[in-house]
Image (tube, grey):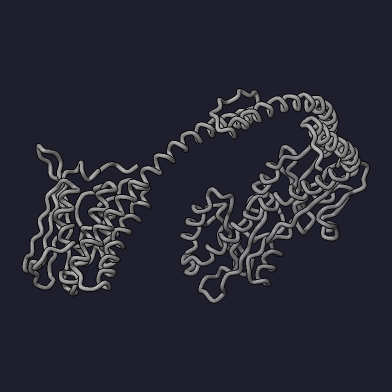
Amino acid sequence: MVRRYSISTYLITAMLAIVAPFCLFLWFLAWQLQASEAEAVDRRTLRSAQSISRAIEPVIDSMVTTVNLLSSTEELAKGEFEVFHRRSQFALSNTGQFVILVDADLNQILNTRVEYGTPLGKISDTEGFERALQLGKPVATDFFLGKTSGKWVFNVLKPLDISGSSKARVLLTTMNMEHVAATISDLELRDGWKAIIVDGGGNALDASGMTPEIRPSTDVLPAGMESSDLSQMPSISHLETTHRQILAYARIGGTNWKAVVWGPLASAQASILKTWQLLIVGTIALLGVCILVVYAASKLLQREVANITRMADELGAGRVVSPATSRIKEFDFIARALSNASYDRSNKEEQLTMVMRELAHRTKNLISIVLAMVRQSAKNVDSPQELVAVTGNRIAGLGQSIDLLTSANWKTVTLNSLIESQLGKFGTVGSDIMTSGPEFHLGSDAVQNLGMAFHELATNASKYGALKGEAGRIEISWEILHDEAGDQLRIIWRETGGPEVSPPEKTSFGTEILDRHLSASTNGQTTLEYHRDGVVWTLTAPVSTLNRSTPE
């Protein structure tokens, strides 16, 4: 037998099950805090170095793009250096880049830092010049002090095609290091932390002060390290100096540079340790309060559950119940739902009774229509097989109207939908069967009666009229006529292009549907004319009897 317990027992047990392991976890968390925070600081330090690298790489890429684009210009190939100087200077005016063109003897042909024609000497970056020629592709240099600018700069050099008529051999774009320093100065660092960029030659860009400066890397890196030492170290290292430090670096793509970030571990962990201490103390205090609150809440839940249970019992007994007011929103929703369910149940029972009556009425009507089909069809057939075929087709046509009404929940159906449903198997609506007229909605009785009429017309057209041959066409049009007696709907069925037709020798069931039955059911007037080129059938009936309404 399953033992049952109160809500108070479950809630208190659940709270104790949470409190005990949570307290143990807090002690374990405090023990693990130092190690986990050190790993977090490592990751943040590496991300800082990587963010500097990612900020500088687009600068290098843009300079490579610049030399690649400028090296293919027509002015450079033809040796039109003055035009090349003017256009390059204008294009790079706001980028911080300058273009220098160098011949095979390291002489500057032009320099966009100065006006064209200004006397220029040799470039000071001979190492970059030789390296670019050797590799045959754009290369980025280390930092160096530029002769023309008098500032620390770096270059991106690209060798030019020596097959041209121009004497230029290397195209380079240069940029001041102070422009690169902005990427470091925007980085937010903790107290005592530093970020620099070092190149392969032992120079370091230090932007931590008020003014960026280039210094030897041994003067900037911690513990007298050299830039070459970084290549022998992992991307994250712990340095045992006077104070334990963390150092991380990231290579800058397309260069020999590295972004280096380092600082003391204590300053990175201080605020986080304090936050965790407050969290632990606050959590313990909060758990104590929760135990008291859970007990009080369980008593309230027991009272509210009792009210909901009472309502459910009354609903099960079939009574309409009023919602019990609850101070708990969810229980209040349940109480309202139970009350609404009791009202809905009562309404559904009444609706079900009405639906059963309506179903019985519609069933009797359908049976009457089917019996009339069978009786009238039996008068005009010669064998039981023909009776089965004729009656079956007419009942199938009636079934299509019923399906159309069912899909519309026995509400209104458009006249165009009814035509497509009844005539779809006889021809193609829009091709050999054309329709035209305003949107018009039919009630359920009109759908059944007009459906039988369209079925009879289409059947006759396929056997004797326009749909018997390929050249035949059927045009179905309708319009609303306005007069003092009220609005009238006029439907015209017109066949053309078929074989010559003549009036039948005797009245058939189909003729009765198209004339007497439809006239009586719609309170309208019908005409059926047999022209030489096809049948023309017309129905004019009051709109009110066709139950036109706006669909819901």
Q: Residue 37 in the image: state x and y as whole percent.
A: 84, 43
Q: Residue 92 in the image: state x and y as whole percent.
A: 53, 53
Closer to us: 161 or 104: 161
**Residue at the image point whose x is 58% and y is 53% from the top:** 97
Q: In which quarter of the image is the C terminus?
A: top left
Closer to us: 181 or 166: 181
Q: Residue 198 in the image: state x and y as whole percent.
A: 76, 53
Closer to us: 165 or 177: 177
Kindly tell me whether residue 275 is visible in this rendering: no
Q: Residue 388 in the image: state x and y as whole percent.
A: 29, 69
* 186 in relation to 434, above or below: above
Q: Is residue 468 left or right of residue 3?
A: left
* 430 in relation to 447, above or below: below
Q: In this view, does 46 lie to the left or right of 173?
A: right
**Residue at the image point whose x is 59% and y is 34% from the top:** 316
Q: Quadrant of residue 482?
A: top left
Q: Quadrant of residue 326?
A: top right
Q: In this view, does 194 lie to the left or right of 118?
A: right
**Residue at the image point whose x is 16% and y is 47% from the top:** 489
Q: Quadrant of the N terminus?
A: top right
* 128 in relation to 339, above or below: below
In this view, the residue farthest toward the bottom is 163
Closer to us: 312 or 170: 312
| Count of numbered badges drawn on the protein | 0
Kindly tell me whether residue 423 is visible in this rendering: yes
